[in-house]
Amino acid sequence: MTSQRTRERLVQRLVDQGITNHAVLEVMRTTPRHLFLDEAMAHRAYEDVALPIGFQQTLSQPYIVARMTELLLADGPRERVLEIGTGSGYQTAVLAQLVDEVFSVERIKALQLKARQRLRQLKLRNVQMNHADGGLGWPERGPFDAILSAAAPERIPEELLQQLAPGGRLVIPVGADEQHLQVVTRTREGFETQIVEPVYFVPLRPGTEK
Ligand code: SAH
């Protein structure tokens, strides 16, 4: 399950699907995805599929984690990054190895607590977590060089755009029945939007849960 060969196969699949950023591929090769799943699911950790993590939520498919991370890093390094939807903490762990500081917001407390333990186990200490509605961003910690959302709003919340630093970019799935991955860059003149590809994410939901 955790064998080197299984992980190499996953990375090869990511390459076949068009992921080219070497740093991202290397982090995906070495990050133990099985640690982010409950035992009953861990044997599927290196398949390129989304997997259940409880509370009707899912750990994103490796391809989409790699793709979003690559888009986030496309124009050079990012220092302060806001993540919306900590979930299992897997995407958080990937980001934490590629940027200076990660600020991760999750609306379900129980998921946040588990994710925090896993990151501690992996000795990833450049992550701050918040139990809150990530649709509002994390204004006290902004502005951010990049924002990545693992949950899809119907429309991009204005708060997220406002918390982007100049030159900063937001990588986010948008839409209800039909969703598309979008990259919004804050330029001197305003905001530039790029529609990347159709995706399927859990919805961004308001408020918080225990
Ligand atoms: N990156 C995570 C993805 C988890 S799924 C992983 O790979 O494990 C998306 C997560 O977004 C869920 O945990 C869900 O609870 C969370 N979420 C949904 N709406 C949210 C909101 N408004 N604020 C914060 N988190 C939210």
Image (cartoon, rainbow, N blue to C red):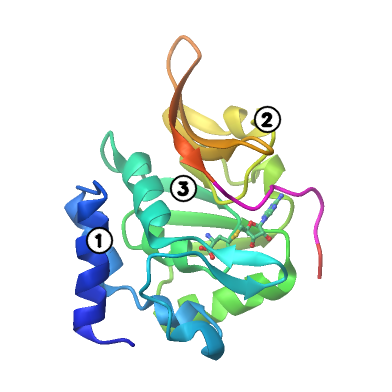
Instruction: Reply above or below: 121 against 157.
Output: below
Question: Which residue was labeled with disc 1?
Answer: 13
Q: Quadrant of residue 129?
A: bottom right
Name the quarter where the N terminus is drawn.
bottom left
Q: Mark number for residue 81?
A: 3
123 part of magenta stretch: no
For the residues labelled 3 and 2, the Cα–Cα distance comes to 21 Å
Q: Which of 79 and 119 is in front in this view?
A: 119
Mark nearer the N terminus (1 vs 2): 1
Mark 3, mark 2: which one is toward the viewer?
2
Q: Which residue is drawn at 61% across and 28% down?
A: 162
Q: Mark number for residue 155?
A: 2
Categorize mark 1 by other alpha carbons within 10 Å: few (<14), some (14-19), many (20+).
Answer: some
Q: What residue type is labelled 1?
A: Arg
Q: Position of residue 125 (x, y in %)?
A: 43, 71
Categorize mark 3 by other alpha carbons within 10 Å: few (<14), some (14-19), many (20+).
Answer: many
Mark nearer the N terminus (3 vs 1): 1
Along the horizontal axis of the image, is 49 left or right of 99? Answer: right
Q: Mark number for residue 3?
A: none
Q: Which amino acid does label 3 sit on?
A: Val
Along the horizontal axis of the image, is 28 left or right of 157? Answer: left
Q: What residue type is labelled 2?
A: Arg
Q: Where is residue 149 in the image (x, y as percent from the top left)?
A: 55, 46
Magenta-tinted stretch: 200-208
Q: Position of residue 110 (x, y in %)?
A: 71, 75
Q: Which of 188 and 111 is in front in this view?
A: 111
Q: In which quarter of the image is residue 195?
A: top left
**Magenta stretch: dominant SS?**
loop
Q: Which residue is drawn at 63% across and 43% down?
A: 152
Dot 1 and dot 2 residues touching (CB under 8 Å):
no
Q: Where is residue 34 in the image (x, y as percent from the top left)?
A: 42, 81
